[in-house]
Amino acid sequence: MTSMLRQYLNIRPSELAPILMAALYFFFILTTLMILRPARDALGMQAGIDAIRWLFMGTLVATLLVNPVFGWLVSKFRRLTFITATYAFFGINLLVFAGLLLFAEEAVGITSGNVFYIWMSVFNLFLTMIFWALMADRFSLEQSKRLFGVIAVGGTVGAIFGSAIAWQLAETVGAPMLLVIAAFFLVLATAAAWGVALLQPERKDLDSDDPDAPPQVSENAIIGGTALEGFRAVFRSPYLLGIAAYVLILAVVVTFIYFTRLQMVAALGDDVDMRTGIFAQLDLATQVATLVLQLVVAGHVMKRLGVHVALVLAPVTAALGFIGLAMVASLVVLVIFDAIFRAVQRAIMRPARETLFTVVSREEKYKAKAFIDTFVYRGGDAVGAQTEGLLARLGMGLYALTLVVVPMAIAWAALGLWLGRQQSKLAEEHNQTAERKSNSAEVQTHHDQD
């Protein structure tokens, strides 16, 4: 058993408990989100595809407003307090929406549907952002390269489980109960977050010379700083600015694929059940492909080939996929491309991207990361949606999108290479600083003894 953990999964026996808890945490997060996703899409599409493009703009504004509030929580409270407070806020919101659907169904129209779509889009990003921020705070850089791909498997299984719950129960229990069920899984996610944070080795058991040793973090420590520090940090640091640019391009490309999928499925007919079935098949193909990649190669790509290679795979996949769609614009090609791209994105690129935050300060892990993963990402959504809409209005289709995506993918890949190398430099500088401090402490100890 120990040999298999080391050779195949790259897991040390002492790491098994926190990894299982982290995977369980991600399982609950993705279960929650996938239960809610059908309700969000159904309510958001009431006014048509063009309206969704403008809902992306509304989401961008909402994330900008929420970020300072989250930054204030991070500044004033310890880690588990602001995580719990954020999840509790969203959980209460879920119950309020459930109450509206159950007791005031006549009030749920296009406007309230749009509000839910925007709220859900903000909720989605903050849930996953907090999860990955805690992972970057809990595990070291060397651990993240080995373990983040394995931990992400829990999320994929949760996505499959959540989709199954939504599919089976949507018609029998209705949307209000689905929101209540999602709130229950959010409570479980909060409990799992506490488990991840508290499952830390004793300080006396930590070897400061071991690169796989997790960061020494006091659970009672308050990060401090200001509410807007995350925004300032991004524009002060070329490294964080590079991550922001990488995420921005990612969001634009993901949005292009999203609207291409909407357009192709819409062209098949207006039947809601037919569309639901096709979307379900796309999601299932994506999740199965993601799970296969996570189990077989994800953990080994970063460890053996490096973070920079993992970051380049998504841009290459996007460029090749859009070229294929431009040559053969069919739903079959879209299904294959969508499944492969999202599998690479979730199984390989996302864990690699999250390792980038293991070499920054704790304040940047939560505040700068929140700004990048929410506002910058939704900014990319808005840019992508408006660009795709403009090309559609001009009568330009997949060929035009391909001409936009390919040069973007080249810049995106170059950014991935640069970020991977910068991460290595920052990690080396951190190790040298830690070594100097250790040597200085030893010299002081010998001096005191003399």
Image (cartoon, helix red, strand yellow):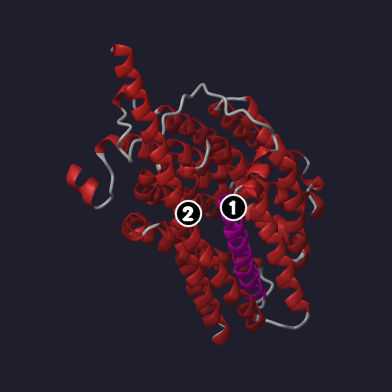
The N terminus lies in quadrant = top left
| Type of the residue with mark 2 | Gln
Q: Toward the viewer: 379 or 305?
A: 305
Residue occupied by mark 2: 422
Residue 219 lies, in percent from the top left, at 48, 24
Q: Which residues are magenta?
A: 239-266
In the picture, measured across the screen, residue 53 lies left or right of residue 253, that is right
Residue 205 drawn above or below residue 35: above
The C terminus lies in quadrant = top left
Residue 367 lies, in percent from the top left, at 61, 39
In the picture, measured across the screen, residue 377 lies left or right of residue 361, that is right
Q: Cβ–Cβ below 8 Å for labels 1 and 2?
A: yes
Q: Toward the viewer: 313 or 244?
A: 244
Q: Is residue 265 magenta?
A: yes
Label 1: few (<14), some or many (≥20) within 10 Å? Answer: few
Q: Toward the viewer: 206 or 294?
A: 206
Residue 280 shows which numbered tag? none
Viewer can see residue 387: yes
Viewer can see residue 200: no
Q: Is residue 440 magenta?
A: no
Residue 161 lies, in percent from the top left, at 46, 50
Residue found 43% across the figure and 30% down from its top:
195
Residue 38 drawn above or below residue 208: below
Residue found 55% across the figure and 45% down from its top:
128
Residue found 71% across the figure and 83% down from its top:
396
Q: Marks 1 and 2, Cα distance to the nearest angstrom? A: 10 Å
- The numbered mark, 1 or 2, whose residue comes first in the sequence reads 1
Quadrant of residue 199 within the rendered picture: top left
Residue 442 lies, in percent from the top left, at 32, 24
Residue occupied by mark 1: 238
In the picture, measured across the screen, residue 38 lies left or right of residue 48, that is left
